[in-house]
């Protein structure tokens, strides 16, 4: 079955808007588990704009699902990951001024650095994932440096769908499908995520090489109206329908 990782970053965004203890990201993680999530994703950004160090401490102590820690490739984040040793570490590009992650890592342009960076994480038992675009050179470089997983950035595909640019959307989807095939051929596990909604998840979930989707912002937004458990349940239903 295609796995669903639920990203709880924006539960923390709402909490931080008022500086209160609620809503609690750990409570959201527990609800996600009850609703059928297979894992929890949390991005500890350098500026701590949503998830905090205390959130990671609490998730590692109390969470029974696998934790996927998203982070930038910095010495500080590496130290945090090595201290906690989460199930998975997903390296993402990060800029202070961006609203959300805008693109994939340039693995091909930073092979030596990233290869050295992920080595101690691998030795510590973390599954290392690289958040990348679907370009062949990035996928091939990810395989060369020893990543276990690549997570393909679906943001452009989702944006093109929202904007009604359907020919370009279909071309982007074809690129994602080709990238997934290449990554699978190279022995990489393939994940996908960013911007996925009820309307856009189907074609991505239908890609046979994709083993996991990581979805956050839309689920938290939908939960305002339906509740988090129901939003996750509906996303799971659409994923399963697409796979069939």
Image: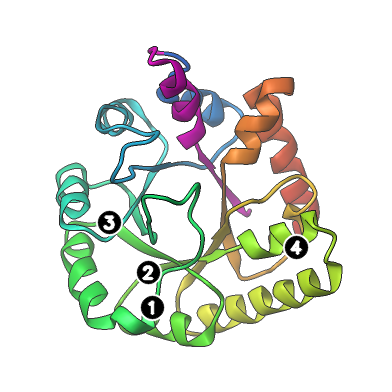
Disc 3, SS: loop
Name the residue rendered at 75%, 58% in the picture: 243
- Going by the image, does 140 lie left or right of 85? right
Q: CA distance from mark 1 to mark 3?
A: 16 Å
In primary-sequence order, the first of circles 3 and 2 is 3
Q: Describe the element under mark 4 as helix, strand or loop.
A: helix
Secondary structure at numbered mark 2: loop
Image marks 3 and 4: residues in contact by CB distance under 8 Å: no
**Residue at the spot of label 1:** 142
Quadrant position of residue 60:
top left
Q: Looking at the rendering, which quadrant does residue 146 occupy? A: bottom left
Query: Seen in the image, is 77 located left or right of residue 17?
Result: left
Q: Are marks 3 and 2 in contact (CB under 8 Å)?
A: no
Q: Does residue 149 show up magenta in the picture? A: no
Q: Is residue 244 visible?
A: no
Q: Residues within 10 Å of mark 2 (few under 14, many from 20)?
A: some
Question: In this figure, which residue is indicated by the disc labeled 3?
Answer: 126
């Amino acid at each position: 079955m295609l796995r669903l990782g639920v990203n709880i970053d924006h539960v923390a965004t709402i909490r931080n808007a008022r500086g209160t203890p609620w809503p609690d990201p750990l409570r959201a993680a527990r609800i996600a588990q009850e609703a059928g999530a297979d894992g929890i994703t949390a991005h500890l950004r350098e500026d701590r704009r949503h998830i905090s160090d205390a959130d990671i401490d609490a998730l590692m102590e109390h969470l029974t699902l696998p934790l996927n820690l998203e982070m930038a490739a910095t010495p500080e984040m590496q130290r945090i990951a090595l201290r906690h040793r989460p199930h998975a570490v997903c390296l993402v590009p990060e800029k202070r001024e961006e609203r959300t992650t805008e693109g994939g890592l340039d693995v091909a342009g930073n092979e030596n650095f990233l290869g050295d960076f992920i080595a101690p994480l691998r030795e510590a038992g973390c599954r290392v994932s690289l958040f990348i675009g679907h370009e062949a050179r990035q996928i091939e470089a990810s395989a060369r440096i020893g990543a276990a997983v690549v997570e393909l950035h679906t943001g452009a595909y989702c944006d093109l769908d929202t904007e009604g640019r359907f020919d370009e959307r279909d071309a982007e989807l074809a690129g994602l499908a080709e990238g997934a095939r290449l990554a699978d051929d190279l022995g990489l596990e393939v994940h996908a995520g960013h911007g996925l909604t009820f309307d856009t998840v189907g074609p991505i979930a239908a890609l046979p090489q994709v083993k996991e989707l990581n979805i956050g912002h839309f689920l938290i937004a939908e939960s305002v109206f339906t509740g988090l458990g129901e939003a996750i349940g509906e996303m799971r239903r659409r994923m399963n329908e697409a796979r069939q």
